[in-house]
Amino acid sequence: MSLSNPSPRRLTRRGTRTLKAAYAQAQRDVKRMDPAVLAAIGRSKMNSQDLKHLAHANINGLQGGNQERVAQQLNAQAAAQVQATTPASQRTRNPFKQLSNWNQNRKDIRHGKQTLQMAYAQAKSEVKRIDPAVRQGIGRSRVTKQDLAQLSVAQLDAPLRAGINQAAQHHHTQARIAAATAATQPPRQSAGQRVANAVNTASRWKNAVRDGANGAIAKAEKFRTDYNERRQNPIGRNAPATTAPSTSPQPDLAAQKAAQAKAVHAGLNNTMPTPEATSQSPEAASQSPEAGTGRHRAPEAAAAFDGIAPADGAVASKPATQQATTGQGEAVPAHNKHHKPEGQER
């Protein structure tokens, strides 16, 4: 077979050598890629195996058919991964924050560069796993390694940059929505209003604590009242409570009358004869109005019991109009049944 018409085996070997050289060139050209793409690779948490499969899928997609659909699916997954891990760009005037952001971006770029270089190195060592028809087509097309390296880098760069653009568009939409929401909200409070709100909040907390303490005191008083009620009424709280008897003394009329009668009888039994009654004759004694009942003076208790009392406090005798008289007009002396006259004494 002539050189102008090489065999398929030779074309396959030529395509394999060209593809290896292209991957090696792409590995060296990683340092000249866009830093934003390298930072997106570093933040996307994709490893070298994922990037290697993505590069092989893009090369196999040149044949068309099923390989092209697989390449499109992998590119969409890579774009979604980059979009999910790309943060919103935040502008700040804080120098420390700016330094922190720059340092983090530098680390992401370094990590993305190392990961992509490792991916191209692995792809170079696994070129023989690519479809032989693809390698044969590359050998027949006589494409150079520089062109193939640029094609591989462009195919890998396109989905990653699409993910970055989608993330930026998403963040822009979210910012517009947040601005519209903030415009519909009431204006922000001033410093004085915030201080007043803080004071009101502290006052409400203080009142709540005080109310809680008062509630605890009320509960304790209620418990003490219930306890005392249960002690006084052990039958039950709802049962009618028995009223304690009144301690105020009630006057006993029967006892009072009995005491007065006893005093009267005691006075009648203890009458003493007066000197005037012993010295006078029986007729003078019977005619004397001061003697009252004869030779014996009536006891003070009897006069008090009859209700006749003089102004000076002494017990007065009964008036003459109230004394019983005989048929001749003489007053009949009141005799005591327990005292006998002198003539009848033994």
Image: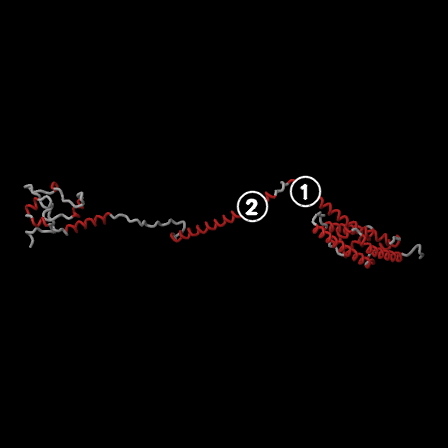
Q: Which residue does the image show at 77% across and 49% down from the upper left?
A: 161
**Of the image marks 1 and 2, the number of the one nearer the N terminus:** 1
- Name, please, the residue furthest toward the right: 2
Residue matched to label 1: 179
Name the residue nearer the viewer: 185 or 83: 185
Mark 2 surroundings within 10 Å by alpha-carbon count, few (fewer than 14), some (14 through 19), many (20 or more) = few
Q: Which residue does the image show at 14% across and 52% down from the upper left?
A: 270
Point out the frontmost of discs 1 and 2. 2
Which disc, if any, is residue 141?
A: none
Residue 246 shown left or right of residue 193 in the figure: left
Measure how far apart labels 1 and 2 are at the Cα level. 31 Å
Mark 1 surroundings within 10 Å by alpha-carbon count, few (fewer than 14), some (14 through 19), many (20 or more) = few
* Secondary structure category for the residue under label 1: helix
Looking at the picture, does residue 229 appear above or below residue 189? Answer: below
Q: Disc 2 marks which amino acid?
A: Val
Residue 30 shown left or right of residue 307 in the figure: right
Question: Residue 126 location in percent, x, y?
Answer: 81, 58
Could one spot residue 308 in this view of the protein?
no
Residue matched to label 2: 199
Quarter the C terminus occupies: bottom left
Question: Residue 58 location in percent, x, y?
Answer: 81, 52
Q: Which residue does the image show at 10% across and 50% down from the upper left?
A: 275
Could one spot residue 7 in this view of the protein?
yes
Q: Disc 1 marks which amino acid?
A: Ala
Name the residue nearer the viewer: 19 or 228: 228
Question: Residue 93 location in percent, x, y?
Answer: 70, 48
For the rendered model, the colour scheme is: secondary structure
* Secondary structure category for the residue under label 2: helix
**Numbered-mark total:** 2
